[in-house]
Image (tube, grey):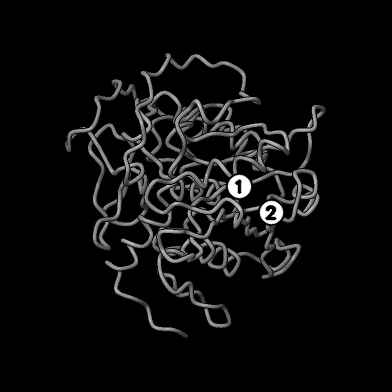
Amino acid sequence: MPPVRDPRVLTAGLAAALACGEPAPAAAPEEDAPAPTSRPAPRPLVHLDPLGPRDLDPARGSSPRLTVHLEPVDARDLDLLARWPSLAHYPRVPQVLAAGLRARDPAAIFRGMELAFEPDRWAEIDAWERLGHIRLGDPAGFCRTDAGSPVRLSPGTYDLGCLGGFLEGVRLLWLPRLELADLVPCDPPAGFESCQDGAHAGRAALLQIAARLPADDLPHGLELLELRLAELGPDALIAALVPDALNLCSVSHRARARGGERMYHHMMIVDPARDRLGRVRVFDTTGAAGVAWRSMRPERLHGYARRLLALHDTFRYDPESARLTCLPVRPPDGEITGP
């Protein structure tokens, strides 16, 4: 097994690779926008920082945040906290989420997560802890990673970065006690390739998840799908995903600023089942949309992964090199009927 690298190097690589840089809103029309919610209108989005979304919180000079009103967990749902310990740190556990967990319904779980974090969205696209995540070990709660060590976020900050939001989806569906540190070491179990450095952290995370799931949950076993978007049209992309499975994916591009090195810099979960309008569903977390469960037409998903996620002032990703690397996982079975 390859040696584990210095965690400070890995943290820097992870921050670079999973910066989740996004274009200004004018460049990303919401053609499949979700139904309106009660969220107050956000302040105008600012232009992207040249270094990508920054790790900011109120204590370090970021934009002011709305006052958070924590909502206690319904007494009837306290048993869920023992099964899914990260829920204890959510600002609220909506009934949609609680019901979805009991029914083991992925769509309801993803929608419930969206509702749980929606009221506490950051006000500006760059006022976001892009490495924010929920830690189960000490220090428990919302943290970021700094030089290989977890650091608590400021009180009232409930930010999930793109990997942190992805981690919550994986926890609530399959691996409730998985830690971010389990995905980051970039030293997959014996038999897997090393991720080499933080640029490959997104792909390594998929391998780490695969190694922890039962074989029956993996319709393609430990094999990852490698989907080159320049060679696949929108409909062919959806057809290449595994039906009747949730496809855990990392988006990657070659970075012109790093000599063409491939960087796995965004995470998403795709349900390829189409609705009556031909749309698929995508769960991911971004600076522009927050924790989101969105319907996308195949054309929009293709353009989102190939071109919009390639817009990054620092790394200058090549959209023609876009690739979706995916781990198909069967949805969880069974229903929880009570404590």
Q: Is residue 15 above or below residue 158?
A: below
Q: Amino acid at mark 1?
A: Arg
Give percent across and percent down for residue 163.
46, 50
Report which quarter residue 7 is drawn in: bottom left
Q: Mark 2 sits on what residue?
A: 230
Report which quarter residue 2 is drawn in: bottom left
User: Does the rendering let one see residue 134?
Assistant: no
Q: Is residue 288 above or below residue 18?
A: above
Q: Residues within 10 Å of mark 2 (few under 14, many from 20)?
A: few
Which of the two residues, 36 or 154, is positioned nearer the viewer here? 36
Q: Badges 2 and 1: C-beta atoms under 8 Å apart?
A: yes
Q: Residues within 10 Å of mark 1 (few under 14, many from 20)?
A: many
Q: Mark 1 sits on what residue?
A: 306
Identify the residue at horizontal 62%, vertical 64% (top origin).
213
Which of the two residues, 269 or 235, is positioned nearer the viewer here? 235
Identify the residue at horizontal 69%, vertical 54% (top origin).
230
Q: Secondary structure at mark 1?
A: helix
Give percent across and percent down for residue 94.
51, 27
Mark 2 or mark 1: whose residue is earlier in sequence: 2
Q: Secondary structure at mark 2?
A: loop
Give percent across and percent down for residue 324.
63, 55
Identify the residue at horizontal 36%, vertical 36% (top origin).
48
Lateral position of residue 279 relative to residue 167, left or right: right
Q: Is residue 121 above or below residue 135?
A: above
